[in-house]
Image (cartoon, rainbow, N blue to C red):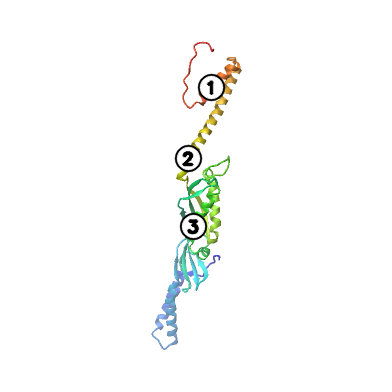
């Protein structure tokens, strides 16, 4: 079922018409034997019944109208509107809304239990689908968003296992786009448009958080040490090249090994080194 424009008139114009009919019909009421007076009474009755057709449409709201169970259209024009009094009208908000899911526990694609939550920005784009295709579109948005979040979270690892691999923690924009598409696919049938979907909470589950923190710390230490060693080797190589170019000293292989060892200890150590001065010969 798709949205269509329903019948409605400018309410102020209708008020003017009803007042004009009232002014014309009232003087004729006293003449009960005259046909004109009977017509005037009928017009006054219709005037009174027509008052039930007025409705106020707020900005970014829609009135979904039905007649004896049949959908007859939607009114989106703002202001005072008038429609057929027999139409049943239901107000649907078209404004942008936020939904924040609760924290749910789910396993990522590595089997690690994690806690995750999302914020979904959405609005109704098709009032007919929102009202007639699902029983309660707001509840439908909440449940389907959490279901999509659970399915998306189980498709990616928490941390990247390989370089440039997509993970929940390292690629927030990619994950947000994937989550938005996942939710939109589920909400299309309800006439809802998803404007944005972002992760609002992401953490390991408490039972493994401590172990995973130690693993992250170990990985960080290994990465830091790797960079330090690479830099130290480059500095040692540069020092030997400079000594050779400037003919400062001639070093045999054994002395080079001692010098390299000393330089690596100084450059790679995590504490300040204490120099030892040899007052005698090298041997």
Q: Disc 3 or 1, which lies upstream in sequence? A: 3
- Give the class, few, some or many, for how many residues have Cα within 10 Å of label 1's Cα (few <14, many ≥20): some
Task: Answer whether labels 3 and 2 touch (C-beta < 8 Å).
Answer: no
Marks 3 and 1 sit apart, C-alpha to C-alpha, by 62 Å
Marks 1 and 2 sit apart, C-alpha to C-alpha, by 36 Å
Q: Is residue 243 above or below residue 76?
A: above
Q: Is mark 1 on a helix, strand or loop?
A: helix
Which of the pair 248/226 is nearer the observer? 226
Q: Disc 1 or 2, which lies upstream in sequence? A: 2
Task: Answer whether labels 3 and 1 touch (C-beta < 8 Å).
Answer: no
Which of the pair 180/193 is nearer the observer? 180
Please name which of the two marks, 1 or 2, marks the residue nearer to the observer: 2
Marks 3 and 2 sit apart, C-alpha to C-alpha, by 32 Å
Q: What element carries label 2?
A: helix
Q: Which residue has dot 3 on it?
A: 143
Q: Position of residue 259 (x, y in %)?
A: 55, 19
Q: In which quarter of the image is the N terminus?
A: bottom right
Quarter of the view holding residue 238: top right
- Give the class, few, some or many, for how many residues have Cα within 10 Å of label 3's Cα (few <14, many ≥20): few
Q: Which residue has dot 1 on it?
A: 263
Q: Position of residue 248 (x, y in %)?
A: 58, 15
Q: Is residue 157 above or below residue 46?
A: above
């Amino acid at each position: 079922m798709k949205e269509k424009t329903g019948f409605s008139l400018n309410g102020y114009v209708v008020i003017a018409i009803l007042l004009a009919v009232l002014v014309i019909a009232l003087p004729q009421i006293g003449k009960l034997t005259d046909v004109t007076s009977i017509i005037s009474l009928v017009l006054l009755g219709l005037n009174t019944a027509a008052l039930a057709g007025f409705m106020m449409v707020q900005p970014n709201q829609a009135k979904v109208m039905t007649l004896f169970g049949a959908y007859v259209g939607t009114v989106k024009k703002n202001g005072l509107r008038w429609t057929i009094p027999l139409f049943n009208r239901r107000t649907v908000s078209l404004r942008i809304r936020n939904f924040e899911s609760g924290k749910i526990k789910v396993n990522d694609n590595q089997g690690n239990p994690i806690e995750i939550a999302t914020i979904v920005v959405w609005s109704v784009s098709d009032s007919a689908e929102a009202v007639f295709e699902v029983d309660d579109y707001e509840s439908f948005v909440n449940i389907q968003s959490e279901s999509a979040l659970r399915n998306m979270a189980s498709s990616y690892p928490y941390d990247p296992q390989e370089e440039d691999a997509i993970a929940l923690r390292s690629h927030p924009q990619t994950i947000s786009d994937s989550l938005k598409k996942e939710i939109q696919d589920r909400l299309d049938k309800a006439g809802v448009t998803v404007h944005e979907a972002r992760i609002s909470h992401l953490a390991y589950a408490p039972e493994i958080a401590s172990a995973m923190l130690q693993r992250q710390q170990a990985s960080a230490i290994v990465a830091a040490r790797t960079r330090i060693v690479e830099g130290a080797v480059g500095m040692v190589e540069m020092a030997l090249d400079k000594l050779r170019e400037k003919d400062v000293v001639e070093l045999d292989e054994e002395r080079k090994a001692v010098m390299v060892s000393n330089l690596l200890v100084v450059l790679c150590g995590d504490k300040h080194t204490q120099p030892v001065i040899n007052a005698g010969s090298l041997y």
